[in-house]
Amino acid sequence: MVSRCARCGNPAATFMSYDYAERAVWLEDLTRATAEAGHPLCVDHADRLTPPMGWTLTDRRSVTPLFAFDVA
C-alpha cells in the first residue's frame, strides 16, 4: 500500500512527527516512520514545512546525491 500525503494526496516520501510538550517537529524518511503522532507528506509539502513560532524543526531525512562521482 502506498502512503499518501496528508495535505494533497500525492505519494508520500516523508513522515512528519511532532511532540507538543517539547515544541518540536521532525521530518524523517518514510521508511523510518514510527508510531508517534504525525503525518505522511510528499516531498513538496515537506520541503515547504514551517513549524509554529517557537517550535524547532529537525530534518532527519537522508540526502540522496543527484550525481555520483567516482573519486579514485
Image (cartoon, helix red, strand yellow):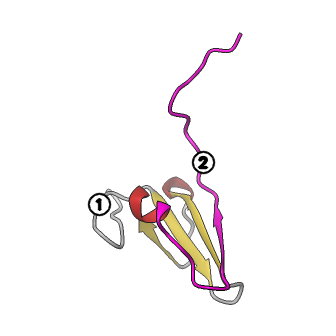
Are there few (<14), some (14-19), or many (20+) residues within 10 Å of tag 1? some
- Give SS at disc 1: loop
Q: Toward the viewer: 10 or 1?
A: 10
Are there few (<14), some (14-19), or many (20+) residues within 10 Å of tag 2? few
Q: Which residue is mark 1?
A: 10
Residue 62 vs 64, above or below: the answer is below
Residue type of the residue flagged with mark 1: Asn
* Residue that appears at 33% across and 64% down: 4
Q: Quadrant of the C terminus?
A: top right
Q: Which residue is mark 2?
A: 62
Q: Quadrant of the N terminus?
A: bottom left
State which region is magenta. Answer: 47-72
CA–CA distance in space, label 1 to label 2: 20 Å
Q: Mark 2 and mark 1 in contact (Cβ < 8 Å)? A: no
* Horizontal side, residue 16 vs residue 9: left or right: right
Quarter location, residue 35? bottom right
Q: What secondary structure prevails in the magenta region?
A: loop
- Which label's residue is closer to the chain start, 1 or 2? 1
Q: Does the magenta segment cover residue 69? A: yes
x, y percentage for residue 36? 57, 75
Q: Toward the viewer: 53 or 9?
A: 53
Quarter location, residue 45? bottom left
Residue 48's tag is none
Q: Can residue 42 be seen in this snapshot?
A: no
* Residue that appears at 40% across and 59% down: 44
* Residue that appears at 52% across and 27% down: 67
Residue 22 vs 30, above or below: the answer is below
Residue type of the residue flagged with mark 2: Ser
* Residue that appears at 54% across and 63% down: 33
* Horizontal side, residue 28 vs residue 54: left or right: left
- Residue furthest left in the image: 9
